[in-house]
Amino acid sequence: MTREKFVKAIKVALVGYGQAGRRIHAPLIEQAGGEVVAVVTTNADRIEQVHAELADAAVVPTLEELLADRARLGYDCIVLATPGGLHAEQAEQILDAGVPLVVDKPLAVDASAALGVVDAARNKAPLTVFNNRRFDRDFATLRSVVESGQLGEVLRSEMRWERWRPEGTGMWREHLSAAEGGGLMLDLHAHTVDSAVQLWGPIDSVYAEIQARSTEAEDDAFMSCRHASGVVSHLSVSNWAAVPGPRWRVLGSAGSYVVASVEGEPVAISELADQDEQHCGWFFSDEGRSSVVVAKHGQQGFYEEFFAALALPADDVEGRQAAMPVNPSDAVHVLAVLDAARRAAVRGSVETVITPGVAPGAV
């Protein structure tokens, strides 16, 4: 059986049909060749949307009923796209039923709870976390620049996810506490930290400045992270930037790389806007600047890798888990960094990152 034929046979149950489930997961699943055959929701508007957009998908009112009716519904895996505060408990319930699982980030609201989910998956079912930003054009292109060696020794990396939303948007994340999964730390900073760790390795310590100016949880947060590799990452997410800074600015001993644009936000430095769709960012050195050819990318790649992992024999538990697009243990470390950042912001100190389940220095 070819991979293409297998991918088209994958049937997915989607738990949640809000912003993430409807606008992110469902389209990417389809692009990767999968099929959403069931959606869990009780919201009348969402039910109407499911019937209009996924005509062949069954609507199921609860996760419990979804799990109990797997044989009839015929799904191969579940994608969990509910508010983050629900993830740990729901994920453990799904894994106990032996169903392969994708959890939208964050895996949980803190590192200890995330480790509990990872432990719950052992010898039961494959588990992965939806860190889709690893498949973005800017991240993929930066990774290619780093791997080329043209930056020399990387000294400092800056990543920003800044926009102007001082009055908020009314989304659920703005009205829930951090303990319930709300705020930009568990939303955007879960991505920025994951990106930094993928590029520069585990983080040893962190300093942070965190504010909740107009929402229940934080809407403005800066972190300075020191990686075990020696690289320092400056990570900024904010709803209070009428003039957003560059998405990426990476400083190396042989040059620097800059990506100015931030997904639909104004480009503050217009001369650094991407040259065209075939290029992403600019490399600066003693020889001047040059536009960088965009690397292969596409968020559907996450689901292509996930579906390919499910093509492995069901009794190859270790092999299927190893082939997952994101190692869920990565999410435990990311949350440990965010936990340390919260401590740092309260104490006004630099805090050591303590990743549960991992010996110090062994992340």
Image: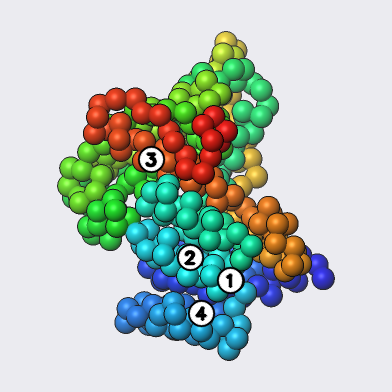
Residue visible at 51% across and 50% down in the picture: 131
Q: Pointers 3 and 2 in contact (CB under 8 A)?
A: no
**Above or below, 72 relative to 36:** below
Q: Which mark is residue 99?
A: 1
The quadrant of the rendering that contains the N terminus is: bottom right
Could you tell me how far apart the alpha carbons at marks 3 and 1 are, in whole angstroms?
29 Å
Q: Pointers 4 and 1 in contact (CB under 8 A)?
A: yes
For label 3, the residue is 338
Q: Nearer the viewer, residue 160 or 82?
A: 82
The quadrant of the rendering that contains the C terminus is: top right
For label 2, the residue is 92
Could you tell me how far apart the alpha carbons at marks 4 and 2 are, in whole angstroms?
12 Å
For label 4, the residue is 67
What is the three-letter code of the residue carrying label 3? Leu
Residue 187: x percent and y percent? Answer: 37, 49
Q: Pointers 3 and 1 in contact (CB under 8 A)?
A: no
Q: Secondary structure at mark 1?
A: loop
Seen in the image, is 346 located left or right of residue 103? Answer: left
Residue 235: x percent and y percent? Answer: 39, 33
Which residue, as the protein is rendered here, is positioned at the far bottom? 72
Could you tell me how far apart the alpha carbons at marks 4 and 1 are, in whole angstroms?
9 Å
